[in-house]
Image (cartoon, coloured by chain):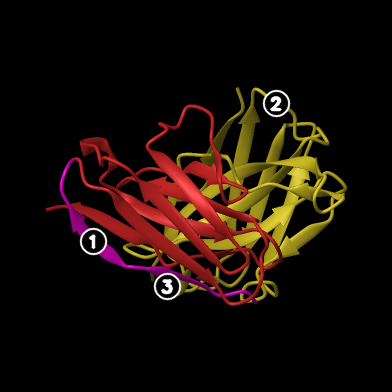
Chain colours: A yellow, B red
Amino acid sequence: QLQLQESGPGLMKPSETLSLTCTVSGGSTSSSSYSWGWIRQPPGKGLEWIGTIYYSGSTDYNPSLKSRVTVSVDTSKNQFSLKLNSVTAADTAVYFCASARNYYDTRRRSTVTDAFDIWGQGTMVTVSS
Amino acid sequence: DIQMTQSPSSLSASVGDRVTITCRASQDIRYVLGWYQQKPGKAPKRLIYAASSLQSGVPSRFSGSGSGTEFTLTITSLQPEDFATYYCLQYYSYPLTFGGGTKVEIK
């Protein structure tokens, strides 16, 4: 069974670069069966999708964060990562990594990515001076 | 971007009640919608995918319906462990967008 675990700094200062890693077990980041994503949740608020990386290595990002975000995969370590530049207090949130299955949708007649089904436990990141 | 409007934002219900939560999409997303349950301090758990497909291991009292722009999550006979916040997610097009959430509280 696929399992995900986030790691990274708990406390950061404004203008720094946030780096988070998600370690995958029970599956492979090089598998064409999965896409990998990041979602965040500010304290007391709802969920915000950050970005997704696909088997091909291509990525999609939330336009609201696109200029500051990079998602990448390290297949040698079976990990994928999030980098967010120039953080501010508004980036304070719990950050989740998640996986989504790729499958052939007969109705849409194409290979698509499913809704995230496996999530890490989340890691709290606080940005404060 | 596709906006997902979820209602109500909160509700109070009793054990055994039938609960309905609605998500409306700002444009046609066909059936490409998921529902999640989140408890405090925990990651979201997928309940429903493709609008009406029940996630393996999820109790059958949860069901999803709808297509196009209007979707519903129904919990028949609410159980104590169902008190949580529920979110919808459209994954039809990017950027992926979540509804604002519905907090289900004990009456």
Point out residue B65 in the picture as x, y percentages from the top left corner.
52, 53
Closer to us: A34 or B54: B54
Point out residue A78 in the picture as x, y percentages from the top left corner.
72, 32
**Span colored in magenta:** B1-15
Q: Are marks 1 and 2 in contact (CB under 8 Å)?
A: no
Closer to us: A81 or B63: B63
Q: Judge depth for marks 1 and 3 and give the one in front.
A: 1
Side of B29 where B88 appears, left or right: left
Reading the image, the residue beneath label 1 is: B11
Q: Does B12 appear in magenta?
A: yes
Quadrant of the frame with the C terminus of chain A: bottom left
Identity of the amino acid at label 1?
Answer: Leu
Reading the image, the residue beneath label 3 is: A89
**Residues at marks 2 and 3, CA–CA distance in whole angstroms:** 35 Å
Q: Judge depth for marks 2 and 3 and give the one in front.
A: 2
Q: Residue at x 38, y 54 (%)?
A: B86
Q: Are marks 2 and 3 in contact (CB under 8 Å)?
A: no
Tell me which chain the residue with mark 3 is part of. Answer: A
**Residues at marks 1 and 3, CA–CA distance in whole angstroms:** 31 Å
Identity of the amino acid at label 3?
Answer: Ala
Q: Secondary structure at mark 3?
A: helix
In the image, which disc is placed on residue A27? 2
Point out residue A35 in the picture as x, y percentages from the top left corner.
73, 44
**Residues at marks 1 and 2, CA–CA distance in whole angstroms:** 39 Å
Discs 1 and 2 carry the same chain letter = no
Q: Judge depth for marks 1 and 2 and give the one in front.
A: 1
Identity of the amino acid at label 2?
Answer: Gly
Query: Can residue B9 be seen?
Result: yes
